[in-house]
Image (cartoon, rainbow, N blue to C red):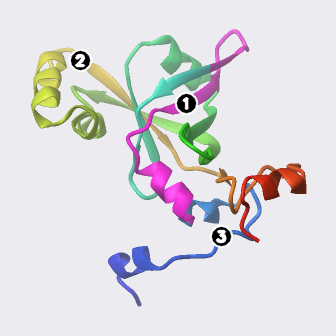
């Protein structure tokens, strides 16, 4: 049986896998976007039934996309009522790379700073700035919520190997699609 490290070196051809299949998480595009420091967008339904999209930091742990939030916010109340979400992580430079995830989130209340939140802040701010920020917020009474998404639907677009389903062939050719 191969080790986890050896398995991570295996490149799986995902070009023929249909959108929605969770095996797309193994595609190079998905892996790059899951581990990036780019801001992701979390879409959910608010308590009044209308849609919301908010920017969030994320951390991929290999099975879950983890987002952190402070307790007792409108977002947490809405997610408790309607835990089905969609997440988009994408690039803006050159041909877009897009990872779309859907599923239901699980939420866990945590006293103090959520460990994954500390990791996110270190990745974004660096060690010195994040240490100062985390020390400033880690006060008695701080409550955070761990929001974890195990994707049940995955879509990947890279505009070279994977296009939206109805993109005309001349558009693909003009963008230099690989055949």
**Residue 46 inside the magenta-drawn segment:** yes
Residue 152 lies, with reference to residue 131, above or below; the image says: below
Which of labels 1 and 2 is toward the front?
A: 1
Residue at 65% across, 43% down: 102
**Residue 168 inside the magenta-drawn segment:** no
| Residue carrying label 1 | 41
Residue 30 lies, with reference to residue 117, above or below; the image says: below
Numbered label attached to residue 52: none
Residue at 76% across, 71% down: 179
Residue at 30% across, 37% down: 120
Can you tell which quarter of the image residue 125 is in?
Answer: top left
Percent position of residue 114, x then y: 27, 33
Residue 96 lies, with reference to residue 28, above or below; the image says: above
Left or right of 71? Residue 171 is right
Which of labels 3 and 2 is toward the front?
A: 3
Verify CB contact (< 8 Å) between mark 3 and mark 1. no
| Residue carrying label 2 | 142
- Circle 1 — which element? strand
Percent position of residue 172, x then y: 80, 55
| Residue carrying label 3 | 14
- Stretch of the chain drawn in magenta: 27-52
């Amino acid at each position: 049986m191969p080790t986890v490290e050896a398995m991570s070196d295996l490149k799986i051809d995902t070009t023929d896998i249909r959108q929605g299949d969770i095996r797309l998480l193994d595609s190079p595009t998905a892996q790059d976007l899951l581990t990036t420091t780019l801001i992701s967008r979390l879409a959910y339904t608010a308590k009044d039934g209308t849609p919301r999209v908010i920017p969030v930091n994320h951390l991929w742990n290999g099975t879950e996309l983890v987002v952190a939030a402070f307790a007792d916010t409108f977002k947490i109340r809405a997610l408790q009522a309607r835990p089905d979400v969609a997440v988009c992580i994408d690039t803006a430079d050159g041909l877009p790379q897009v990872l779309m995830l859907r599923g239901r989130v699980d939420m866990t209340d945590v006293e103090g700073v959520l460990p994954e939140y500390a990791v996110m802040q270190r990745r974004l701010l660096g060690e010195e700035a994040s240490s100062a920020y985390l020390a400033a917020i880690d006060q008695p009474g701080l409550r955070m919520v761990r929001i974890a998404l195990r994707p049940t639907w995955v879509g990947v677009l890279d505009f070279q190997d994977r296009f939206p389903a109805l993109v005309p062939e001349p558009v693909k050719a003009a963008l230099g699609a690989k055949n």
